[in-house]
Amino acid sequence: MKNIGYFSLVLHAHLPYVVSHGTWPHGVDWLNEAAAETYLPLLKVFGRLIDEGMSPRVTIDLSPVLTEMLVDEEFKAGFKRYLEQKMEAARHDIDEFTLLGEEHMAGVARMWLDLYGSTYRDFVDTYGEDIVGAFRRLQDGGHIEIITCGATHGYFPLLSRDESIQAQVKQAVSSYRRHFGRDPRGIWLPECAYRPSYMWKRPAGEEREPYLRKGVEEFLSENGLEYFYIDAHLLKGGKAMGVYLDRFEDLKNLWATFKDQYQPMPETTERSPFRVYWVGPAIEGKMPVAVFTRDPATGLQVWSGEWGYPGDPNYLDFHKKRFPGGLRYWRVTDSGADLADKQPYNPESAASRIRENAGHFKDLVKGNLRGHLEETGEQGIVVSPYDAELFGHWWFEGPECLYHAIKALHDDGEVRLVTGGEYLDLNRPVEVVQLPEGSWGEGGYHWIWFNDMNKWTWVHIYEAEDEMHELAARYGDTNDPELLQILAQAGRELLLLESSDWQFLISTRSAADYAAERVARHYEDFKKLAAMARKKANGESLTDGDRNLLALVKQRDNLFADLDPRWFGALEFAPCGARPL
């Protein structure tokens, strides 16, 4: 059977660092929910496909900060307690629904009891409480490719120092080697946000003259990373579609204040999202980096909660929950319906829609590839990147639909499933392109992560970046082990402060107070550690209070044991120089 092209499914699994930073409604329960509803179901889908003789060939980014949390013993113990609480909530609901004569709802409650029970057994017995190890074994078996991300999901284009981006990338690569026993080949840029080299000026804080910044691709090349992903509008212009607007009502309201300022770039037909390109100069020590582009059609079909698959009236509604247990018993009904109008969920009706959606997705992929083949005479690649948490957490039926979509493409035989690295091994790019600045947010730029509501966070980030650079440049080579511990913990606090999740949560108002508190905490602890580092470097004795603070912060923010403060102190490679757009 003729191969008409390639398909690459890419999943981005990430959460901010929440271990030891609250439980519910904001905190580690975010991680518990994602592990129960997304990460373990994905492992189960991949294992099921393999058992049936199919290799999923999925590319998945397990962000460094997520990986650090999943291996944390505190998470593992707490996750088991979380699953036990969910099972107890289901038992309570079964009893209450039965008492009220609501047998249908009691049946859905029994579904939850069975689901959380099997999730507990999978976590403990099948995967030995080691989710990261389970993904690693799939990669070692050649079935998936794991890529990396910025260490704490820092928003690269807005970080004010190249040393900060260098530290985000170097920590990501180092953490990956430690957990997966090899070097990563690809990276998911946080928020798919890219910035080329040019004379850049800080948009907040202390006024400074513009200064030359390195292109993001330079950091990737320097650290052996071969490819990354962008949204289609960065490649070929046109309207940026965004990926979050359907999920957050407050984001729609915020976008209304920005959309009149948004001017889409002129669209070109010379570049295609079905091709892979090189980005960056081919000079000594810096190979160009390949860029894969999101396919708009398959992206919107899965992302959109209004007319995409997750908005099917039969599927489980995400927002309406029954308290105190927090389980869900209602279906979407209508994407515009308020919570009071949601109708009871019917698992059988939902299951009947999954195969149809999966078949439609397969046909959509094939149609795109066949059209490209007929137009150009070449086999293209459809790249479909999504937040992993969309599958299972936001869209309950998502993992099952994923299973059927992969199976349908495999059984069809005309499309070859590939990971990012596998495709590059088969088809090296031949054309170099220059990309503009932007992201996959609505409007294609930075407004979600930089606006009047969260601008203040960048003032603190920029101040801390400068101070960390100064400390690392001056003391990073010290032989004093205690000073190195202080500098390393200051680096961890800066990395956590830089997380783009805080600006996102403020803009969406989904957890604005929590995000603001986290920014303040990491900033304040960084400043205390910086003062402590200077004190130690100047030969002054640390007090018991100083050492207690260091121990407390190290215990709370216990990640990235291999962090090297020197990453913040000096650039390993100078900028290549600004290149005109």
Image (tube, grey):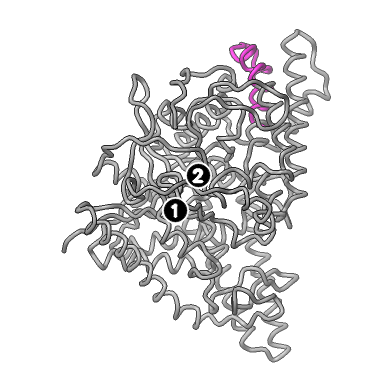
The answer to whether 38 appears left or right of 105 in the picture is: left
The spot of residue 518 in percent (x, y) is 73, 42
Mark closer to the chain start, 1 or 2: 2
Classify 556 as above or below 319.
Answer: above
Residue 216 sits above or below residue 401 on the image: above
Q: Nearer the viewer, residue 557 or 15?
A: 15
Magenta: main secondary structure equals: helix
Q: Quadrant of residue 373?
A: bottom left
Q: Which residues are magenta?
A: 469-493
Identity of the amino acid at label 2?
Answer: Cys
Quarter that holds the C terminus: top left
Query: Looking at the picture, which amino acid does disc 1 mark?
Result: Pro
Indicate yes or no whether the magenta region holds residue 478.
yes
Gap in angstroms between the C-alphas marked 1 and 2: 10 Å
Is the residue under label 2 in contact with that under label 1 (CB below 8 Å)? yes
- Residue hosting label 1: 385
- Whether residue 333 appears in magenta in the rendering, the answer is no
Q: Residues within 10 Å of mark 2 (few under 14, many from 20)?
A: many
Which residue is located at x 72 percent, y 29 percent?
205
User: Which residue in the rendered view is the most extreme toward the top?
Assistant: 539
Q: Residue at x 42, y 49 (%)?
A: 267
SS for callout 2: helix
Please state the horizontal and vertical placement of residue 301, each as a whole percent of the image. 45, 65
The x, y position of residue 148, in whole percent, is 47, 40
Numbered circle sitting on residue 61: none
What residue is disc 2 on? 192
Q: Residue at x 24, y 56 (%)?
A: 375
Residue 158 at x, y = what percent? 60, 34
Residue 214 is left or right of residue 344, and the answer is left
Q: Is residue 538 above or below residue 519?
A: above
Question: Secondary structure under badge 1?
Answer: strand
Q: Is residue 570 left or right of residue 425?
A: right
